[in-house]
Amino acid sequence: MSDPQLVTPADARWLRTAAACVLAGLVVEVISVVATTPVTFLLFLGLGLPLLGAGGLIFLLNLWRVLVRRGAL
Amino acid sequence: MMSHLLVLVALALAAAVALYVLFGARHLSASRAGRILILIGLCLLPVGAGALGVSHDLGRSTETRFCLSCHEMRPYGQSLLIDDNEPVPAVHYQKRLVDRDTACYTCHRDYALFGDVSTKLSGLRHVWAHFAGGPPAAIKLYRPYPNASCLHCHAGARGYETSKHHATAEVNLLDLQAGKLSCLAKGCHAVTHDIASLADADLWKHVELPK
């Protein structure tokens, strides 16, 4: 069911930030998969993975904020 | 090749979901199905994609082409093609005693427990050496080449066990196994990557090194 109160514009901004991080991490990962060299591998480990992790973390933090706001936690 | 394509397809799928969330976050979050898609796209897929990427890249990092992608390693790759029966790496490569696709890794990996980890850490040291001031003029192993790497394949092999050269007054199998005498000792298998004579050496033209 639709619940327009669930996600505020601020929440949507956080979601977009998380999605942008995940997307950037995936782009770095694709580069390292297409051309696997020591440099691209390290780029993936040093930049791609942290971006993916940051995206997931931002999403989870936002989810936690929403749940707290709604009194579910 | 197939797994390479599958990884790319999986990453494209993950990227498509992330893109959808990026441009439709507000719309998606208004419905239960949309919120589940957001959960998948921003939480589950990145974990899967990250694991897939690490697994894929670790696999690729064992390939000869990966090692030779650093220009410092090209001469060592070319030394595999020296047309001579003495250099140990060239003999192993040309006679297909090792898988050519993973030739460097097969001989230079650590076969001990957690050997993969220590091998990868050594690889990181190579990268550090490359970027922090460049490699030394003469590239050397961090530690003497361990007999265990040779014996991983040769121990128990008839040619190794029954060789008359391995049962002399100076050389015996027990000392070799204990590492008291190096397989690469002078007078034994001392010629390895013969970079110094590479310019004058004849190279076997039948195969090409991976680029």
Image: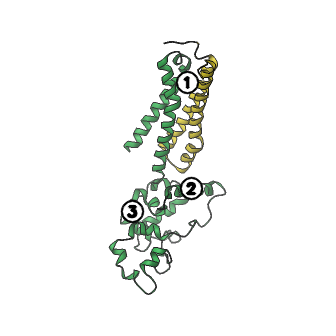
Chain colours: A yellow, B green
Residue type at mark 2: give it. Leu
Residue type at mark 1: give it. Leu
Look at mark 1 in the image and give the residue it sits on.
Answer: B22
Question: What percent of the width, then of the height, locates residue B189?
Answer: 45, 75
- Above or below for B8 versus A67: below
Q: Earlier along the polypeptide chain: callout 2 or callout 1? A: 1
Q: Give the quadrant of the C terminus of chain A.
A: top right
SS for callout 3: loop
Q: Nearer the viewer, mark 2 or mark 3?
A: 2
- Above or below for A18 versus B206: above
Q: Nearer the viewer, residue B50 or A37?
A: B50
Residue A69 vs residue B154: left or right? Answer: right
Residue occupying the point 47% across, 45% down: B55
**Are discs 2 and 1 less than 8 Å apart at CB?**
no
Determine the image quadrant of residue B141.
Answer: bottom right
Q: Nearer the viewer, mark 2 or mark 1?
A: 2
Q: Earlier along the polypeptide chain: callout 1 or callout 3? A: 1
> Which numbered marker is on residue B98?
3
> Which numbered marker is on residue B121?
2
